[in-house]
Image (cartoon, rainbow, N blue to C red):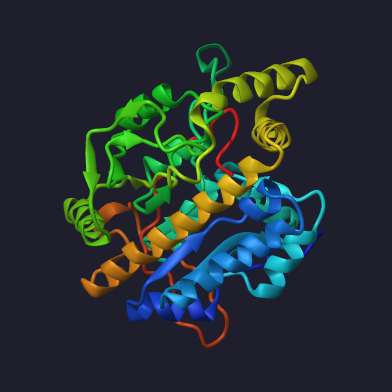
Amino acid sequence: MTGLPPSAAPAVQVSEEVARAVADGRPVVALESTIFTHGLPRPRNLAVALEAERQLRAAGVVPATIGVHTGVPTVGLSTEQITELSAADGLDKVSLRDLPVVAALGRHGGTTVAATAFLAHRAGIRVFSTGGLGGVHLGASESFDESADLTTLAATPVTVVSAGVKSILDIRATLERFETYNVPVIGYRTRKYPGFYVTDSGHEINFSVDSPEQAARVIESRDRLGLPQAVLIANPVDPAEQLPPEELDGILARAWAEAERLGVTGNAATPFLLDFIQRDTGGRSLEVNVEVYRGNVRLGGEIAAALAASGASGASGAAGGSGAAPVVDAPAGAASAGGAPAAGPAPAAAAETGA
């Protein structure tokens, strides 16, 4: 699983298609890779990854699946690269702190929300669709177990469409953290914060938008103000597709009890817990997971199209970053995607759970 020596590998590889779309102001949506490298079982993982790309293309949006291939952080993985990563064993789960290490060692890796958001911003992409965000773990007051998603999104001016944070997390504490980090959390046609597998986590949020165009106006306002943080769009799963809320507490209690019994902690906790939930629900949670992702990809495409229609798609955060524009390597003949300002530094958390 080794690739080019560090001196020969580009810092960030941006596909020609993605680079040209960003330069032309056309809608582009970033997609993470841990959903198919770590989050879903084979062969469903590859089918879902390729379906998301087809879904965006059918809507006139350019997909930019992001991952690390042979040590090269890549924005716009090819179908062949996605297929290879989907089938590979022992891939690294790459958060922002891991990017330089995996790159230097020439390894494959699936990028988490934190790493994907950072690389999307580096490439000038403004909208990123994922399933669920990482956040504060239960018991974090003693373990200090918080996702690097939190600090990265506080310093990276992208827009992230998700179905809330994962149900296995401390949702109340995570929302408090987002408030502390000045990250706006906005419901899509709701002020009830979703809980990934369920439409309503039981927590209220202050604001909502009713259309992709309204979401685009919030993003443009953030950029005009020169603010550095992400905008989070919370898009709940259809109530008809959710797990029965009355069952969820019991499922989660069993999942955590099994993780504690086996001593599963840190980076391994999220995939273990999600796999347990899938088995405990007889596969129903997997179908919810896929439906959540479809809905977020759809909405992300609509928001990206609204930004492009407003003429703002190429702004990439305007004054939202800090420092000089980074150099981003693109394939020969591609337009440079290096015009986006780099996100400010984000400290790594104890464990990353943003897959």
Farthest residue to the bottom: give it.
333
Q: Quadrant of residue 223?
A: bottom left
2 over 345 or under it: above or below? below
- Give the quadrant of the N terminus: bottom right
- Is residue 13 visible in the rendered image? The answer is no
Residue 175: tell me if it is visible: yes
Towards the viewer: 355 or 317: 355
Q: Residue at x 34, y 47 (%)?
A: 233
> Which residue is at 50% across, 49% downward?
292
Give the quadrant of the C terminus: top right
Left of 27 or right of it: where is 136? right
Left or right for 155, reference 198:
left
How many marks the image carries: the answer is 0
Q: Residue furthest front?
A: 240
Residue 139 position (above or below residue 120): above
Q: Nearer the viewer, residue 5 or 291?
A: 291
**Residue 236: % across, % down:** 40, 44
In percent of width and height, residue 41 lies at 74, 50
Q: Position of residue 264 (x, y in %)?
A: 74, 24
Q: Give the residue drawn at x 20%, y 56%.
A: 214
Percent across and percent down for residue 313 are 30, 69
